[in-house]
Image (spheres, rainbow, N blue to C red):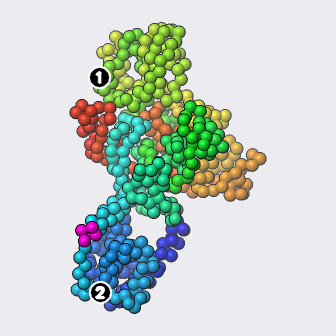
Amino acid sequence: METLLIFLIITSIPVLIGLMKIFEKAGQPGWAAFVPFYNAYIWLKVIEKPMWWYLFILIPFINIFMLFLMLVETAKTFNKNELKEQALAVLVPFYYFPYLGFTEKEKYQTKEERPVFKKTKIREWTDAIIFAVVAASIIRMFIFEAYTIPTPSMEKSMLVGDYLFVSKFTYGPRMPNTPLSFPFVHHTLPLTKNTKSYLEWIRFPYHRFFAFKKVKNNDIVVFNYPDGDTVATNYQNQSYYALVRNYGWQNVNNPHYIPPGHNIPMGEVIARPVDKRENYIKRCIAVAGDDFEIRDQQVYINGQKAVNPEKLQYQYFIVTKSGTYLTKRELERLDINDDDINMYFNSISNSGFHNYVIINMLQISNADSLIGSDEYGRLGILTLTAKNAEILKRSNRTDKVIRLVYKAGIANPGNEIFPFDQVNYPWNQDNFGPLHIPAKGETVKLNMKNIAIYKRIIDPYEGHQLEIKDNKIYIDGQETDSYTFKMNYYWMMGDNRHNSADSRFWGFVPEDHISGTPLFIWFSRNKDRSLTNGGIRWNRIFMIPE
């Protein structure tokens, strides 16, 4: 925040000094340039614009756009009508305004005194495009932005193919870390593979403007991927830190290293600022200060059972009799998409031949042990809501087809589950914690056991240098046994509990990563169906996610 204030002061003082001289050239009191609010009133008189503009000057974030307009209109009062001249007024007013104010050859002119400037068609289109881009960029940055749901981690609350508007102002708009960026793209330039879409000549520290509400338990939240501060360019869809745990630091940071079972090298390793990390959408399960735990798939907050989302999903074993199966029509009736059945695997067990639908980390031996020695025929694993699981159990085809509907349990390898220390924290997706969610101002005692939980908070989230030497903890070169948190933290999980890369896999979400919350779904497309056969989910259009 201090860096941001210093930058604003350094750039605004020359602008105000230049504006003072411009006011004087226009016959207005120069001292008015240094009086907040009154200076805007005088400025509108100088550029001869209606006083109703003042209302927009008072509206947060809209006033940024109004400032750009007023800078351009001020240049026009000195008969500066060329695009490059007006660009100087917008991009470097701390240079251009003192020039206009102090240079004697530059004369202020009223509308009546200025010669008529006739724009060419190209100039009219250029101005219109610039106007639209600036306005849309401000809206996208501070007010709302369009997103799409690419993965099934939030099903059935939010579906793959949902297009939604996300409110940036609900939790308070963030000042962008990297304000110099190509419009309407995230971190990579269009038509390129790894070219950055932003410049880091100016980098602002984290600052959040006023908020309408705080993040609460069970809110659906859009945030920047915490593990995304570093990426291997050829494996950007995977956590860099998971790659390091799997293949070793030296291998992952070797651009020519090809992991076993893959055919492309790692590529360059790059770092990204917070606002340019991948966007994720999950449900906030626990907020700062909460005690969080999962016992046999049930979440507990502060020792009490958490309220489960209505459309919460788990994976279920569906075992049918030999030679029988669930039809596509039955799956569609239950709204089971192709994403709910990821891949097929054939296996021969002691009881005969079976078709297994294997999802995520389910081991084949687990499926075999479920079947036992009886000839069950076909075993599937489907992702279902509790309601749909009950429908299957009570189906009128149960006696003829389905032998068993059983909620699956998944055990994950120790290097996948946060905090990646199975000796001290033998947790998995279905049994996790207890874990305290850090709050701003809280102090925690550090030791060699719990440092695994807090090391990413200390470095890199809060920007300290953490070192461990001879079983001692050093922060910024000083030995310590405690740490006071500078930010609030949150715990995010998907509603599709067995198919979601969430906080159970990478830990806490810092408050400076919080981007917004969904406003409403404006379009929804089911990619598994044709447009004439349920491809457009009309019932979800204009729906508010919850």
The residue indicated by pointer 2 is 109
* Residue type highlighted by circle 1: Arg
- The percent coordinates of residue 217 (x first, y second) are 44, 45
Magenta span covers which residues?
Answer: 120-124
Q: Nearer the viewer, residue 160 or 200?
A: 200
- Residue at the image point whose x is 40% and y is 29% from the top: 340
Q: Residues within 10 Å of mark 1 (few under 14, many from 20)?
A: few
- The percent coordinates of residue 531 (x first, y second) are 25, 35
Magenta-colored stretch includes residue 398: no
Q: Which comes before the other along the chain, label 2 or label 1? A: 2
Specify whether 351 is left or right of 542.
right
- The percent coordinates of residue 226 (x first, y second) are 52, 48
Identify the main secondary structure in magenta: helix
User: From what the image shows, is residue 399 above or below residue 269?
Assistant: above
- Which image quadrant for residue 314? top left
Residue 360 visible (yes or no): yes
- Residue at the image point whose x is 36% and y is 53% from the top: 145
The residue indicated by pointer 1 is 329
- Residue at the image point whose x is 52% and y is 43% from the top: 234
Q: Nearer the viewer, residue 510 or 234?
A: 234
User: From what the image shows, is residue 489 above or below residue 532?
Assistant: below
Q: Quadrant of the C terminus?
A: top left
